Image: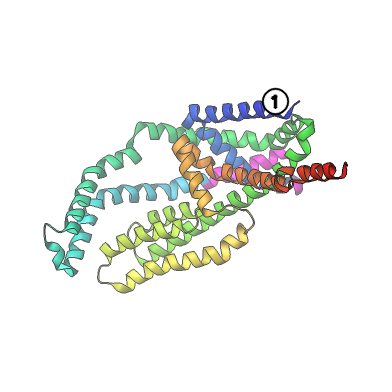
Amino acid sequence: MPLGRQIQIWGALAAAFVLLLWSLGDVLLPFVAGAALAYFLDPLVDRLQALGLGRATATVTISLAMVLVVVLGALLVVPVLVGQTRALIAALPGLTESLSNAVLEYFPTLADAESTLRQSLRSLGEAVRARSGELANLILGSARNVVSLALLVVVVPVVTFYLLLDWDRMLTRIDTLLPRDHAPLIRQLAREIDRTVSSFVRGMGTVCLLMGLFYAVGLMAVGLQFGLLIGAFAGLVTFIPYVGALVGGGLALALALVQFWGDWVSLGLVAAVFVAGQAIEGNVLTPKLVGKSIGLHPVWLILALAVFGSLFGFVGMLVAVPVAAVIGVLARHSAGAYLMSDLYTGASSTSHDLGDRKAP
């Protein structure tokens, strides 16, 4: 088949796939989440198989263990996070006013009602006061969120179980459908994509979990209100380099300024938690669990999250990092092929020129 025709076919299939994602949107979330979880857990099932268990037994064992972890988290951690979220949203107007009063106490010149900063603080307080109730209802109270959460709880485990059970058979079936002329190259790219995605997703998933635990325990030990919530959020966004520490640290320090105003030791301890966390993440956890050869630049990650989140919503943000890794692998392969091509080296035109010169 001519190359141009192949490009048309594969381009049409890719466009149809993107259109499908855009059309279905959040409907795909439970299935995407289940597939991601199955991909994450498949090595554990393979290890149990290597120990002598059958595929079905290993899948049931891992599934039951994950259900136990989720149930314990739902009973012990989630209610606390939900309660702290509600309390933080309800306390935002008062926290804003307390911070404004504390700043004015040390900088009395800002008490001038006509000053720019004074007007900005007043506007911020009014906006927070007006929107806090709406934000609480949006995050925690909407029926749509409740239904979506119930759908996730029911569908994701089922999808994960069946994908884990049939994972190897599905890969074998997909391999038989590859175009024969391009099968070796596709397998090579698939192995590299799997190595890149697994290194990042599995490694960074572990790093995010450990850093969230570290930040939450550290902030609660210092005595910061909403420490569990801030720590969990900081750990969640740790997969974007430096963003977790900067955003989480900024939120923690803002709350600490209100709670510990004048207690510089406590403020320093809050800052020390994030400085220590960044040092542990950058020097120990990320090099050990993720490695430095995955080829995902922080700017590329941020761009992928912004673009996919804007196009496909939460589902887009969920698949942004794996898709960015895939695009990165394909881009490196394309760059390597370009450097070896006549388009880059000019070998074809040079040989033609030499032939023309020798002809006489």
- Residue 338 shows up from this direction: yes
The residue closer to the viewer here, 29 or 60, is 29
Compared with 6, 71 (above or below) is below
Above or below 179: residue 309: below
- Which residue is drawn at the image coordinates 25% and 71% (left, top)? 262
Determine whether the residue tagged by mark 1 lies in a helix, strand or loop: helix
Q: Nearer the viewer, residue 209 or 350?
A: 350
State whether residue 43 appears in this view: no
Residue 233, given in percent of the width and then of the height, sits at: 42, 53
**Extreme-left residue of the structure:** 113
Crowd class of label 1 (few under 14; some 14 to 19; many from 20; radius 10 Å): few
Residue 301 coordinates in the image, percent (x, y)? 52, 49
Corner quadrant of residue 343: top right
Segment colored magenta: 50-69
Q: Label 1: which residue?
A: 5
Image quarter hosting the C terminus: top right
- What is the basis of the colouring in this image? rainbow
Q: Look at label 1 and name its amino acid.
A: Arg
| Percent of width and height locating residue 282 | 54, 64
Judge by depth and name the residue closer to the eye, 9 or 187.
Answer: 9
